[in-house]
Amino acid sequence: MERDLENANPTILNVSQLPSRQRKGPVTRHGPDSKCDSIVFPQHPWPFGSSSSSDEGDDDGEDHVDAQDIYDLISTISDPEHPHTLGQLSVVRLPDIHLDPSPAVLPDPDALVTVLVELTPTINHCSLATVIGLAVRCRLEQTLPPNYRVDVRMKDGSHAQDDQVNKQLGDKERVAAALENDTLQRMVDKMLETCA
Amino acid sequence: MGGGAESEEEEEVREWEFNLVLEGHENEVKSLAFSPGGQYLATSSRDKSVWIWEDVSSGQGRDDEDEWETVAVLSEHDGDVKAVAWCPSNLPNARAGVGRQHNSSEVLASASYDDTVRVWREDADGEWVCVAVLEGHGGTVWGLQWEGKERQDGRFPRLMTFSADGSIRVWTLRVDEEEEEEGQQEGNPFRSGFGGVPSTMRRSLREEWDCTAVLPKVHTRDVYSVSWSADTGLVASTGSDGIVAVYAEESAPEDAAKSGVEGGAENGTSGPKSNWKVLGTVARAHGPYEVNHITWCKRFDPGAEHKGKEEMLVTTGDDGVVRPWQVRVS
């Protein structure tokens, strides 16, 4: 297996180097039992409504999702071929997570928030880019409220077949079809095992 | 998606029995449609193909299985074929533009992940061929709707397409005034991109379709569904942004130059450009969820003033809910 690695020597960051809050928000995330069900089947109403937990620095006591929260959700996903997380491999980077509009200024709790995550695969021809993107989309759709629209893309120029991968990750029918594939679903489940 | 609980209340015995399986597609089937005459069934799939099946049942004996045979496998699309739709042929104008070389008036259109729409007809030899490729959308074309309301100007029914690019486009068949002059078409809009004109396409069958309108932009994300009422001509759309919008065509088409639609021919044969206005929108039609489908249908509920005549909208969403909507146009 070691010989099949697409990138045998990736740069790895120490966990202490990864972006984090001084005191992590005590947000508890409860995903459904099977990690991908929420994408394949109709979702149930977001059960965390007005979460009472609060982060440092929030004036009104409301817990608004920010880029660091998104980072915390997906940086702990395991890489499909290395024993490291996407955060450690810098596939997921905090500056490449964008929320629009910021949930802090949302006029209505049901108003749409677009989450754009740009991924930087470890090497240019990483054939696993689609799987990584799938895992990130899966993780976010399973944990974020239903008014969040998740866009997962390859960072410009980082991947040879960007357009194809982006298009596939943006098509909910293709994402659902991919997750009905046993092999892919097992891979994604395994990658998500390291998520809290 | 939604459960159908009402069937248990009806004691009326109307059993549906399994009849037959049509095998051929390699991946999930995305869409299917019976031709207006019922002779053909078109199916489309993630396997990039469109299949046309013909009803060859003998019609004798009630217990006989239906018999359908494959008459065409159309593989010109470069991606999942998301939807197929037959042109309504019950309209007098549906025969407009049908040249003498055409064997039948049945016209099929397909929408694809390859960002294009293709129009298909049967040629004189009974072969189904692609007669036009409609290019203009900047993303997956999620589906299409034929104009079901008869047109005042007697032209061929138009085609409305909707896409992941957030837009809704109207396409018009160019009137075939100079059939003899074909072959020297400068600036043919179908020449570039996804393979251009298929080699199987005969010159005499080729059709030119022009984008004659882009509906006012409402949606910020994928438009998953549009319904064009054959009754009122009103259009309803919905999609990933959870918005439901209703549009009407303005009665007097403005000057083509003002409409800002690209891709049309300037020689006046491309059909009048049309202008559309938004009559109203509803945000968060299914709360925070995506809305996957919308359709006009007749009202039969007790609240209807003219049962079976006035129309309502029905939507389905990712919340697993089916919602009826009353539409009041003042």
Image: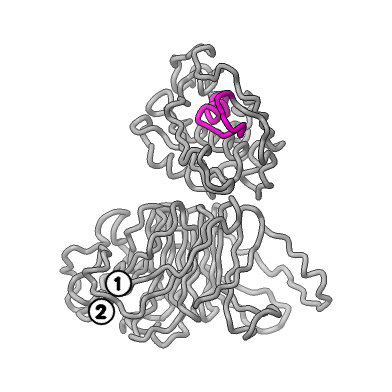
* SS for dot 2: loop
- Under mark 2, the amino acid is Asp
Residue B284 visible? The answer is yes
Chain for mark 2? B
Depth check, front residue: A36 or B49: A36
Depth check, front residue: B43 or B224: B224
Horizontal side of residue A62 vs B157, given as left or right: right
User: Residue A121 occupies which quadrant of the picture?
Assistant: top left
Q: Position of residue A107 (x, y in %)?
A: 53, 46
Sequence-wise first label, 1 or 2: 2
Q: Can you tell which mark lies on residue B207?
A: 1
Chain for mark 1? B
Q: Position of residue B206 (x, y in %)?
A: 29, 71
Q: Position of residue B25 (x, y in %)?
A: 54, 57
- Which residue is found at the position 16% from the left and 65% from the top? B186
Q: Which residues are magenta?
A: A56-78
- Under mark 1, the amino acid is Glu
Residue A11 among magenta residues = no
Tell me which secondary structure the magenta stretch mostly adopts.
Answer: loop
User: Residue B258 occupies which quadrant of the picture?
Assistant: bottom left
Depth check, front residue: A188 or B61: A188
The answer to whether mark 1 and mark 2 are in CB contact below 8 A is: yes
- Which residue is found at the position 71% from the left and 83% from the top? B61
For marks 1 and 2, give the CA distance.
8 Å
Whether residue B152 is situated above or below residue A126 in the rendered picture: below
How packed is label 1: few (under 14 Cα within 10 Å), some, or many (20 or more)?
Answer: many
How packed is label 2: few (under 14 Cα within 10 Å), some, or many (20 or more)?
Answer: some
Q: Position of residue B89 (x, y in %)?
A: 45, 82
Horizontal side of residue B109 vs B132, given as left or right: right
- Which residue is found at the position 18% from the left and 74% from the top? B267
Residue A63 among magenta residues = yes
Give the residue at mark 2: B176
